Amino acid sequence: MNSDEFDVIQNSGLGAMCVWQFSVEFFKAKAKHTGPRLPILFYLLPVVYNRETCFLIHNRNFEGGLYKAISDDKTLSGGIHQRAELFYRKTWNSLNIGIASGLIEYDSESTELRPLRLTFPTSLVLDASNGAIVAASRRLGNWFGVLPIEEISLLLKVRF
């Protein structure tokens, strides 16, 4: 797949699937007690919609993966805050689609996202590039879910 094809698939519908998959894995990693908070979500799409970082992480092991991915490629965290700013609108659109489609809900009291289903929709078929993006979202959800927010902040060089 060339870079133009990768850009075409970066849409908000796919983003909603990424937000949902991230939320599912985060929720599972927190023993189904806590979902991700909004600020952390804004770093998802800039990572998974970047071809190099997506393919760097989409098939890694869940355990220790974020540390290994960053040690293998420092560009994973480089400039992520600026990329998050560029993806701000797409992230909001993806979040809104995820909520409207019944994949996730936002709890305003806890300021958390919660998945409304934990199993992948059987009617959805993903091609290889979309599958890699969703797989990368799964890994990030797990990695962010098992680490304290302070560690994620240090690793990505961002503030939440």
Image: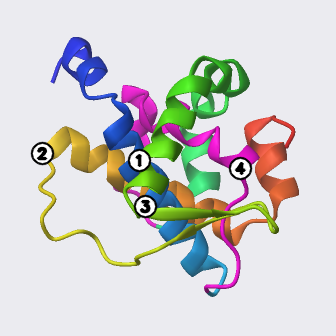
Amino acid bearing label 3: Gln
Relative to the observer, which residue lies in front, 69 or 93?
Answer: 93
Sequence-wise, the earlier of marks 3 and 2 is: 3
Q: Which residue lies furthest to the top in this view?
A: 4
Mark 2 or mark 4, which is nearer to you? 4
Residue 36 sits in quarter: bottom right
Residue type highlighted by circle 1? Ala
Secondary structure at numbered mark 4: helix
Q: Mark 2 points at which residue?
A: 127
Q: Which of marks 3 and 4 is nearer the N terminus?
A: 3
Residue 21 marker? 3
Q: Does the magenta stretch include residue 43?
A: yes
Q: What stretch is highlighted in magenta?
A: 32-61
Q: What element carries label 2?
A: loop
> CA–CA distance between discs 3 and 4?
15 Å
First in sequence: mark 1 vs mark 4: 1
**According to the image, label 4 marks what residue?**
38
Up-down: is 78 above or below 12? above
- The answer to whether residue 136 is seen in the rendering is no
